[in-house]
Image (cartoon, grey):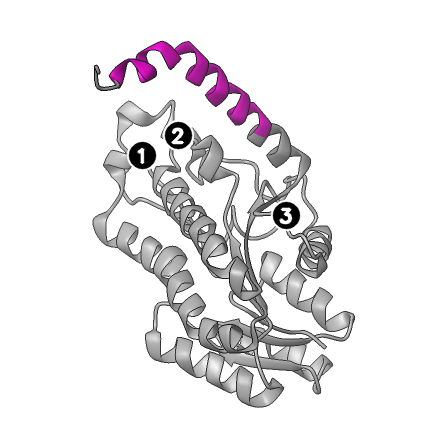
């Protein structure tokens, strides 16, 4: 039996993944800032689900959640760093405190959770760490500069982590979703208080009052959960699991454009060698 610790299980992909893992007989430490939002999982699966309060920006709660999950189920086999929320603002509009909180949650929360479970995974020489990113890290939309930046930071961290952990029998991977029908573009989406007129046709188009995408996204969270289970179960999990046809298309478009730019500027890039 596999034991999962999943952050941000109150709604969305985290919730769908916890439900999918529990339904197939795995154990899940289901966490949310307010444990009452996940207590129904523990009620439905009393032998295999543990509902805990966890704010990933609180170091003491991070350690307590890992300790309690290990105490109840004997160890954490899979950590899913899913907790987070969206933030939209033109770069100039972004509030400094809001941006720091965004990084504390998405990046440093992921770091702290990872460091909390790695000692036991290293001891067992097994385990999987799944870090949620976003196609936004690749396509960097106007108005999502800070969100794209924090997810790019998570992806860079995970790439290095994967290389460090592979020799120890531990897998690290990124999940990069496109649009899914969750609360991400609704209740979970935050934005800057200030909106500058000069950005009305760029970042402004993606502000909540102008964005009609909520509830119309093409992705099914239950199918995303099934895809993550498949990847975690695989003996050859991808470094980056892209979820959604919208995301795969966008990702491929970015790669082609980057390669074309590389070739266009290759002569300049390679003109920098020391003359012998």
Residue corresponding to mark 1: 90
Q: Against 74, is 81 above or below?
A: above
Q: Which label's residue is closer to the chain start, 3 or 2?
A: 2
How far across and down, in percent of the image, does residue 147 sit? 39, 44
Pick the front one: 84 or 166: 166
CA distance for labels 1 and 2: 7 Å
Name, please, the residue furthest toward the right.
Answer: 24
Q: Do the residues labelled 1 and 2 touch (CB within 8 Å)?
A: yes
**Which residue is depicted at the point 35% across and 80% down?**
60
CA distance for labels 3 and 2: 21 Å
Q: Can you tell which quarter of the image residue 91 is in?
A: top left
Q: Against 17, is 35 above or below?
A: below
Q: Against 62, is 230 above or below?
A: above
Q: Give the secondary structure at mark 1.
A: loop
Confirm whether residue 226 shows in the render.
yes
How far across and down, in percent of the image, does residue 39 sit? 60, 79
Residue 270 painted magenta: yes
Q: Against 195, is 86 above or below?
A: below
Which residues make up the magenta segment? 252-272
Residue corresponding to mark 2: 142
Q: Which label's residue is closer to the chain start, 1 or 2?
A: 1
């Amino acid at each position: 039996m596999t034991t999962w610790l999943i952050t941000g299980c109150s709604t969305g992909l985290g919730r769908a993944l916890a439900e999918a893992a529990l339904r197939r007989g795995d154990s899940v430490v289901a966490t949310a800032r307010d444990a009452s939002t996940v207590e129904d999982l523990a009620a439905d699966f009393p032998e295999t689900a543990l509902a805990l309060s966890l704010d990933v920006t609180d170091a003491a709660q991070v350690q307590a959640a890992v300790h309690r999950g290990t105490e109840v189920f004997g160890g954490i086999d899979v950590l899913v760093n899913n907790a987070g929320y969206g933030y939209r603002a033109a770069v100039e509009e972004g509030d400094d405190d809001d941006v720091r909180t965004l990084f504390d949650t998405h990046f440093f929360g992921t770091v702290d959770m990872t460091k909390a479970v790695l000692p036991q995974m290293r001891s067992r020489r097994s385990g999987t760490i799944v870090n949620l990113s976003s196609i936004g890290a690749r396509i960097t939309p106007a108005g999502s500069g800070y969100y794209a930046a924090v997810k790019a930071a998570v992806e860079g961290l995970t790439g290095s982590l994967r290389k460090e952990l592979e020799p120890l029998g531990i897998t690290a991977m990124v999940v990069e979703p496109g649009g899914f029908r969750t609360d991400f573009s609704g209740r979970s989406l935050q934005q800057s208080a200030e909106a500058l007129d000069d950005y009305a046709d760029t970042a402004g188009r993606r502000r909540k009052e102008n964005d009609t995408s909520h509830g119309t996204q093409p992705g099914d969270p239950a199918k995303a959960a099934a895809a993550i289970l498949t990847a975690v179960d695989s003996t050859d999990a991808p470094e980056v699991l892209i979820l959604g046809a919208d995301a795969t298309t966008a990702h491929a478009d970015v790669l082609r454009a980057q390669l074309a730019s590389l070739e266009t500027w290759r002569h300049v890039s390679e003109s920098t060698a020391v003359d012998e």
